[in-house]
Amino acid sequence: MAKVSSEALGIEPIGKLLVRQAVPASIGILVMSLNILIDSIFVGNWIGSIAIAAINVVLPVSFFIAALGMAIGIGGSSIISRALGAGHKEKALKTFGNQITLTLLCTVSLVVIGLFFANDIIPKFGGRGDIFEPAKIYYTIVLYGVPILGFAMMGNTVIRAEGKPKFAMIAMIIPTVGNLLMDYIFIHLMDMGMYGAAWATTGSYLACFLYIFWFFFSKNSELKLSFRHFGLQRNIVSEIGSLGGVTLARQAVVSITYLLMNNILFNLGQEGLVAVYAIIGRMLMFALFPVFGVTQGFLPIAGYNYGAKHYSRVRETINTAIKYAAIVATLVFIGLMIFPTEITSLFLSDNPNQSAKELALNQYVLTHASTPMRWVFAATPIIALQLIGAAYFQAIGKAIPALLLTLSRQGFFFIPLILILPEFYGELGVWISFPIADVLATIVTGYFLNKEVRKELIVAETS
């Protein structure tokens, strides 16, 4: 049964297959995004706007370390998908074993470093003023659970590479449900404040890890490891590193972006603008879940068929994925353009017993968030091409173009824009940097994707 599941990636109709892969991925991402969204709503209503800003300061740090697991997972999963497509199961097993060893070594090392330099890291990411103390509480506790999250994220991508999207979806749902339940208990019932928010997050990581651990030891997985698979093998580690480095570099740039944004906005508007960006950042994670879901569903299909030399199916997968992702991105765009104020109000407490400072901060956020939100999402309908195009090169094992295209939006365009435009346009310069970067990155990605398809896939089909 498991073998048929992976072989189906090279047999079933692309449209049906993409829906089967993308819908569970989208649901999983939706639930995880809802976790972040509702968690922020709970924190904002039960603790305060400063707490939302504090979590926003910590997220890029913990996300970067956790992204090691995702990077190792995606890098290895590209190898696994192509190996299964080519019938090389032993290579798939060795790759998975090496992924586990690398995740353990990397995440634990970085957590130790992160804890040692906590007092230096937090202010650099915008945790200044009233934000510092709650940010440090959240940072310290959540960092303990990051290695567990790293394993969970690595394992989730491998499950998807096996062609088991429903199990991957469940793995993403479990920590969300757990986190929200623990939020209610620790924050609302037990009044633990930031400590409760942090322990709820860490506990949810553990729940996800335990489920993924069970999956690989059950009959549902076709990847059954022995001790010989855990020894690091240079060529596999090199390939995991080169392909996973794309994901890690992307997350590193995201972390740098948060660092710059939090500091630039703090200088422009103190805690108020940092809180505005925190809410917009949650919507960036939440609103685009179906687009990210299509991208996740696209990866194993493209990788498997490329490994099996089914080039016409690879081309069909690219076109279908872009079409599906563009449709849902446009729907997201319409909703955000119409309801920015209503969305912002969900994150703010209406409790009249708040301090005068909290009430003033809430009012500032409510009146200032709508215009930035519209600017940030202004180019959403076209991002499908950029995401699918960059993912294609990663799926087929071409690390350098995948890396360059993945970094194009934030690394090559967005970061220079937010360093330059605010000097001339102030706060507006920050927000208009988002759609400008989206447009430029999409143009570049479209050019190189079209060139690659014409050069390799079409030529291979006709030869």
Image (cartoon, rainbow, N blue to C red):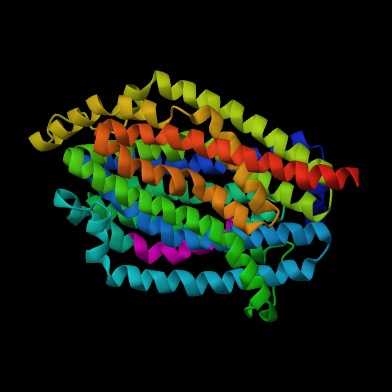
In the rendered image, residue 374 lying in the magenta stretch gets the answer no
Q: Is residue 405 left or right of residue 221?
A: left
Going 38% across and 53% down the picture, which residue do you hit? 255
Going 23% across and 24% down the picture, which residue do you hit? 367
How many labels, in total?
A: 0
- Give the residue furthest to the top: 338
Quadrant housing the N terminus: bottom right
Depth order, front residue of 22/204: 22
Q: Position of residue 161 (x, y in %)?
A: 69, 55
| Dominant SS in magenta | helix
Asked where in the image residue 47 lies, by quadrant, the reply is: top left
Q: Is residue 341 left or right of residue 404?
A: left
Q: Position of residue 113 (x, y in %)?
A: 34, 72
Going 19% across and 55% down the picture, which residue do you hit? 132
- Give the residue furthest to the left: 356
Answer yes or no: is residue 185 visible: no
Whether residue 349 is situated above or below residue 224 in the rendered picture? above
Asked where in the image residue 388 lies, by quadrant, the reply is: top right
Whether residue 334 is situated above or below residue 347 in the rendered picture? above
Answer yes or no: is residue 87 visible: yes
Q: Is residue 31 left or right of residue 132?
A: right
- Give the residue furthest to the right: 463
The segment highlighted magenta reads 142-156
Asked where in the image residue 312 lies, by quadrant, the reply is: top right
In the rendered image, residue 143 lying in the magenta stretch gets the answer yes
Depth order, front residue of 428/171: 428
Q: Position of residue 352 (x, y in %)?
A: 14, 29
Going 23% across and 32% down the picture, which residue do you hit? 349
